[in-house]
């Protein structure tokens, strides 16, 4: 009897809690079942959680592979949970919930199931990108969003040039044959290279990375409604989503009421579709492996850079490139040895060694440098040979008039700052003694005054070991 009841419950799960969950559960099932191999290598919707936010009502979790987070109630289907909390300011984004990254999207009441699958795939791809991010690699890195404040939206030539590129890209997608599509792709690349030279390196990299970030997520959403599988009743809605995305190329620079970033939601998926046409699916693996942007991948796939590569190969053969490379490697090794010796010499000088560690407050910047006396001494290591002003917002303001070793990755600066008798330490205006072995865990308003250095730090921990005093910046509290 019990076995029969369990079998019946599996075949006919209890009704979901609300009309919203009843509407969204089929979308969740189709999202999990997406043909991910045809979207992107390694993309696994079946391993990713999605939060469908219903404005003014609550949120349904999809594919949550654990006990529901606090406040959520499990529903009658595996991986589904609901919370009755209105989220009036929610946005389509990737968010963190109970220590996990989830794709979050706003499930408007009039959204079609196909639109919701597309949005879920877009935001889930961002979660995938974030998880795939590797230091020094572009895929998953994202663009410098602060550049939206300086992007030249009032520059006639740049705006007209971007619009022209979009028209050429649309023509390439509509071309009757691959040869014509390739020729139009070359026109697109030539136009873009010329415009981006005038735009400048920061603006050009912003465009490339925005296309790689938002453009590829939009491509993933598009592919989701193209390859499904979707409910047959959703096909008209899926076709409308695809047409809407394709139609954006006609208005990339004329939607002035909206963010300029939306233009890359148009060109990104268009470049992906053109690459699908000209290279099949292999371009996706190549793009990640070779650390390319979408326009760089299009240039590689279409042979746009073949003439340049041929000229480079000819010059390298004529002037013995292997010997030049070997000589450069020997010079670099010698320079690395010299810089190590210079660094060691700076820190071996007699006197108290000061270490400022800003790793707990996100590292430090420099509010002033002497570029004529600054040397690179390795990956992220700088030698300031005369003067530097390290700073970290309200946490630190310092000035050195003596050589300093700065490790940008570790978030530290080190310097020998003179004899102990020349140093004056105070905390909140009260003199501070730092004998060997001292450990002070909660020091406010630290000040160091000396002939070679001044330091002001809001909240620190102090430690002295032998001649080395370490100042660890702490978050404000």
Image (cartoon, rainbow, N blue to C red):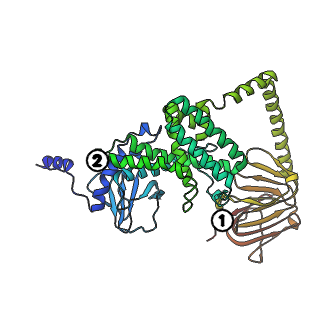
Q: Determine which of the numbered discs, if any, sits on residue 24 in the image.
A: none
Give the residue at the far left of this rendering.
1
Instruction: Identify which residue, 104 or 224, lies in the foreground.
Output: 224
**Image quadrant in which the C terminus is located:** bottom right
Is residue 468 depicted above or below 234 in this figure? below
- Kindly state the secondary structure of the residue where label 1 is placed: loop
Instruction: Identify which residue, 105 or 338, lies in the foreground.
Output: 105
Image position, residue 196 (x, y; %): 68, 46
Report which quarter residue 59 is drawn in: bottom left
Figure label count:
2
Q: Determine which of the numbered discs, if any, sits on residue 474 in the image.
A: 1
Q: Are marks 2 and 1 in contact (CB under 8 Å)?
A: no
| Horizontal side of residue 284 vs 112, given as left or right | right
Image position, residue 460 (x, y; %): 69, 67
Other-residue count near label 2 (Cα within 10 Å), few / some / many at <14 / 14–19 / ≥20: few
Image position, residue 421 (x, y; %): 88, 67
- Kindly state the secondary structure of the residue where label 2 is placed: helix
Q: Which residue carries the number 2 mark?
A: 233
């Amino acid at each position: 009897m019990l076995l029969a009841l369990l079998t019946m419950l599996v075949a006919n799960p209890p009704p979901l809690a609300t009309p919203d969950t009843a509407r969204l559960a089929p979308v969740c099932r189709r999202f999990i079942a997406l043909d991910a191999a045809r979207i992107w290598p390694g993309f696994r919707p079946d391993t990713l959680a999605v939060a469908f936010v219903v404005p003014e009502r609550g949120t349904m979790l999809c594919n949550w592979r654990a006990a529901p987070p606090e406040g959520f109630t499990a529903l009658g289907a595996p991986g589904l949970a609901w919370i009755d909390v209105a989220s009036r300011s929610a946005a389509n984004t990737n968010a963190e919930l109970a220590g996990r990254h989830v794709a979050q999207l706003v499930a408007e009441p009039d959204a079609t199931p196909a639109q919701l699958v597309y949005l879920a795939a877009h935001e889930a791809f961002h979660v995938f990108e974030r998880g795939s991010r590797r230091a020094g690699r572009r895929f998953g890195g994202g663009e410098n969003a602060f550049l939206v404040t300086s992007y030249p939206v009032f520059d006639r030539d740049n705006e007209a040039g971007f619009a022209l590129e979009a028209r050429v890209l649309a023509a390439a997608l509509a071309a009757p044959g691959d040869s014509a599509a390739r020729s139009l792709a070359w026109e697109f690349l030539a136009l873009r290279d010329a415009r981006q030279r005038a735009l400048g390196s920061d603006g050009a990299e912003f465009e490339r990375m925005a296309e790689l970030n938002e453009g590829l997520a939009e491509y993933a959403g598009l592919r989701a409604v193209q390859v499904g599988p979707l409910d047959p009743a959703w096909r008209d809605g899926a076709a409308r989503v695809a047409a809407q995305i394709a139609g954006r190329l006609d208005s990339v620079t004329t939607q002035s009421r909206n963010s300029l970033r939306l233009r890359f939601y148009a060109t990104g998926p268009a470049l992906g579709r053109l690459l699908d046409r000209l290279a099949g699916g292999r371009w996706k693996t190549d793009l990640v492996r070779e650390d390319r942007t979408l326009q760089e991948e299009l240039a590689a796939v279409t042979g746009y850079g073949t003439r340049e590569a041929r000229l480079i190969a000819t010059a390298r053969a004529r002037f013995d490139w292997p010997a030049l490379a070997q000589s450069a490697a020997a010079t670099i090794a010698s320079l690395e040895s010299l810089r190590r010796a210079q660094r060691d010499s700076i820190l071996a000088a007699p006197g108290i060694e000061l270490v400022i560690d800003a790793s707990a407050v996100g590292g430090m910047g420099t509010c002033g440098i002497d570029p004529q006396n600054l040397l690179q001494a390795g990956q992220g290591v700088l030698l300031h040979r005369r003067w530097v002003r390290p700073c970290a917002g309200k946490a630190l303001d310092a000035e050195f008039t003596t050589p300093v070793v700065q490790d940008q990755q570790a978030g530290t600066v080190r310097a020998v700052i003179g004899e102990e008798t020349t140093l004056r330490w105070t905390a909140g205006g009260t003199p501070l003694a730092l004998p060997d072995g001292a450990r002070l865990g909660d020091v406010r308003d630290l000040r160091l005054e000396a002939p070679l250095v001044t330091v002001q730090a809001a909240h620190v921990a102090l430690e002295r070991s032998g001649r080395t005093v370490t100042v660890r910046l702490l978050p404000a509290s």
